[in-house]
Image (cartoon, rainbow, N blue to C red):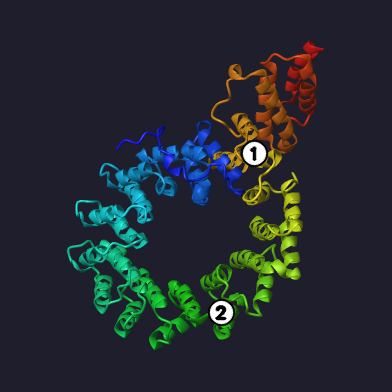
Amino acid sequence: MVLSCCSISLCCWSSLNAKERPKSPVWQINGLVAALENRNLDSFPDDVDGLAFEQIRHLNQLDLVTYRQDAKVIIEKAIADLRQTTIYTGRLKGASQVLEKFAANDPEILQFLRDIANNTQKSATVRCSAVQSLSNLGQVDRQISQMLIALVENTQEPLEVRTCATESFNQLEPRDSKIVPVLQNLLYSPKTDATLRGQAAIALIQLGDNSPNLQSTLLKLAQDRNNDLIARSRALEALGHLKSADPQTIQALVRFMQTETEDSWYRSDAANAVSNLVKVDHPDLSRLLIQALKSPHKHEWLDTIAIDTLIKWGATDPTYQNLMLDILVNPQSNSNIRSSIMYTIVKTNLFDTNPSLIQVLSDFAKNPRVEPKTEFALGKRAISKLGQLGGNNIRIREMITAIAKERWTNLDRRQNAIEALVNWSKSNPRDRQILLDILNNPKEDLQVRLLIAEKIGAFQPLTLSQLFLFVSSTHYSVRNVQTGRFNAYFYGQGTEEIQLLMQWLGRPTALPDLGKMTPADRRKTLQVFLTVWPDSEGFEKSRVELVKAITLIISSSQWTKTDIPLLEQHYQNLNRPQVPDFNEASIIKGVLDSLR
């Protein structure tokens, strides 16, 4: 099937009222479309697509379908990317996931994904992106499961395609009754590639198979040193997915952990599998965990496995928690295990009711100047956790707010504190005002201001002046060109003003053709330049761009006496010693003199 980017059918969305526009994503969708439509102004437009697709993944499907004319631009770009052969994996996955959002309502898009998945001329990576998206559309098209089964059973297909199709079976709803026999044939056939057998085992377990036969087969796969690293690891990973394991399987895994002649990678995988499987006081495993926690001479991987297992076995028990907090506060303890404990504290709520937690975190959050690398990293994470806990705790709020305001403190610490304020600000106007004060202060660190702009821009539109921060960031590095320009469009609502500004500033690949600009266009452009002029102070490279743009437009246009006030304001701005190449003000003065 040949799908024209210009003839994508949107008729299947007619059941949704295009006038019923959701409130929250208005500026986001407009910004995404503006970024994609203006990508030709960027030196690396492919990166703009990747950034856009990443944001689209987070939008509600109804939001996208409701804005169906805007969505057409997004669909066309995703299809064009999947047709390419030279494109990095992240964009392929992003483009496929974007089309997945629309395929349920558009048969042509659904068929396009099928064609990509079955196209043997495409790379395995491209096909896998389509396969993974199709697996989430099983309710829309029952034939998808048949297609995936055919890919898995076809031994002529690349291993990567067969493996990703096998991995996708668990996503299908409803599930085809033919899937389990197919997976069993893969697992129990010695001729099947060991990696694919491991993936088939994981899929079977996810579908409910917990049989002794499956367990013994996986153990044989894991213990066979003739298999490659990935295949053995997959087998161990599959064992860890079991709902429960028989005593023989656990004993075998523990022996595997203890085998000194085995690679530490496999021993770590075995430990992970046991950790996922059991919540019992297994004597051999307990001995290994105690050794990991207390012995100064051990394999580093066992540190984190021990903590992870203790957490799974009962971190809500104060005995376990206090043991781990004692290790955490002891600077003589292994740095890896301390980091693992702090990571768990930050990422879960397991420790939140422990009465000692707040004091432990507060101690780490202090002492921001000179400290060892490990202590500094733990301090940053402690700030993050305090931010999660401190919404109603006055002492914590005061500490976090103070760190957020301190310009002299380390940037990473300060950013974590600002993250906390951002979360609080959604319901507290006082916190939001603190952030806005930092955002609008030109003396503040630019990276801090950019962070705040991104966070606030996620739930309310930014002003043109605030958006200039993204424009100025394009001069940091090549990578910042794409990020800065995309963020300006995305957080700037894709307005006419921001699109106009980005034609001239932020390192575009080419400047607009003045011959195609009407007098009204030129006046509007100069008015936008006036708005952002104060924000360009301190950003020399952006100000140079701005000065050149102002001078070029004024010197190459016909003006009338009614334009004198506008031109005069620009002359006053440029006629200052602190303006780069400020002698160009004389060009504007010449134009003004000719009008007077």
- Please tell me whether residue 111 is drawn above or below residue 346 in the rendered image: above
Point out the tag, 1 or 2, that comes first from the N-terminus.
2
Residue 179 picture location, percent across and down = 26, 63
Q: What residue sits 38% from the left and 86% below the top?
A: 284
- Please tell me whether residue 251 is drawn above or below residue 71 in the rendered image: below
Name the element at disc 2.
helix
Labelled disc at residue 324: 2
Q: Quarter holding the N terminus? A: top left
Residue sitting nearer the eye, 524 or 247: 524
Name the element at disc 1.
helix
Q: Which picture quadrant has residue 246?
A: bottom left
Residue 146 picture location, percent across and down = 26, 55
- Please tell me whether residue 467 is drawn above or below residue 150 in the rendered image: above
On screen, residue 375 versus residue 46, left or right, reads right
Q: Dot 1 surroundings within 10 Å: few (below 14), some, or many (20 or more)? A: many
Q: Which picture quadrant has residue 349?
A: bottom right
Amino acid at circle 1: Ser
Residue sitting nearer the eye, 12 or 282: 12
Q: Quarter holding the C terminus? A: top right
Residue sitting nearer the eye, 303 or 320: 320
Q: Dot 2 surroundings within 10 Å: few (below 14), some, or many (20 or more)? A: many
Residue 325 picture location, percent across and down = 59, 78
Q: Is residue 496 visible?
A: yes
Asked if marks 1 and 2 touch (Cβ < 8 Å), the reply is: no
Labelled disc at residue 41: none
Q: Which picture quadrant has residue 199?
A: bottom left
Measure how far apart labels 1 and 2 are at the Cα level: 46 Å
On screen, residue 573 versus residue 419, left or right, reads right
Q: Which residue is mark 1?
A: 472
Amino acid at circle 2: Met
Q: What residue sits 70% from the left and 66% below the top?
A: 391
